[in-house]
Amino acid sequence: MSGFNMNEMMKGFGQMQMPDMQALAEAHRRNLEALAAANRVAMEGAQALARRNMEILQQTMTEMTEAAQRLASAEASPQAKAAQQAEMLKSAYERAVSNMKEIADLIQKSNGEAVGLLNRRFTEAMEEVKTLMKPGS
């Protein structure tokens, strides 16, 4: 059984090279910049999503009010009014599905942009680490 050899350990430490601290600091700065950019993209996406949700809500409320007024003022048989209501519900459902798809697309686009920024920086950082770890760097 071999014992602990302090001389061998010190010899190993002596052969290790210290990383370039300036290069490490620059890499860290770029990491923080990428994170800040991804956060900015995510925040802009959230703001766009909130604006679009508000627009959809306002549009829906206006359409519902107009539809209710048309239905109330219509001089039609109960069957005709029921048919109008069914058509309005069908149209409202189709718009709701379309709006949900639009919102989902906005979320996916925003998330994709933010993750893309982070992925690019991660790839760059891995290349930087490889370069810093090469002997003689």
Image (tube, grey):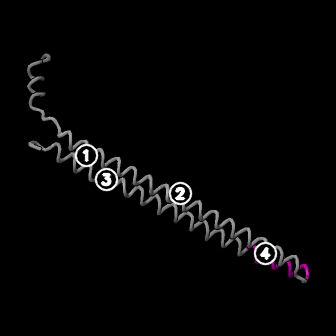
What secondary structure do most residues of the magenta stretch adopt? helix
Residue 14 percent coordinates (x, y): 9, 28
Q: Do the residues labelled 3 and 1 touch (CB within 8 Å)?
A: no
Mark 4 surroundings: few (<14), some (14-19) or many (≥20) residues within 10 A: few
Residue 128 percent coordinates (x, y): 22, 48
Is 67 included in the stretch rendered in magenta?
A: no
Of callouts 4 and 2, which one flags the residue occurring earlier in the amino acid sequence? 2
Q: What element carries label 1?
A: helix
Residue 103 occupies quadrant: bottom right
Of callouts 2 and 1, which one flags the residue occurring earlier in the amino acid sequence? 1
Of callouts 1 and 4, which one flags the residue occurring earlier in the amino acid sequence? 1
Q: Which residue is drawn at 81% across and 75% down?
A: 85
Residue at which label 3 appears = 121
In which quadrant is the N terminus drawn? top left
The stretch of residues the image draws in magenta is: 77-89
Residue at which label 2 appears = 46
Q: Which amino acid does label 3 sit on?
A: Arg
Mark 1 surroundings: few (<14), some (14-19) or many (≥20) residues within 10 A: few
Q: Do the residues labelled 2 and 1 touch (CB within 8 Å)?
A: no
Residue at which label 4 appears = 66
Residue 57 occupies quadrant: bottom right
Looking at the image, residue 42 sits to the left or right of residue 20; the answer is right
Mark 2 surroundings: few (<14), some (14-19) or many (≥20) residues within 10 A: some
Q: Mark 4 to mark 2: distance in Å?
A: 30 Å
Residue at which label 1 appears = 26
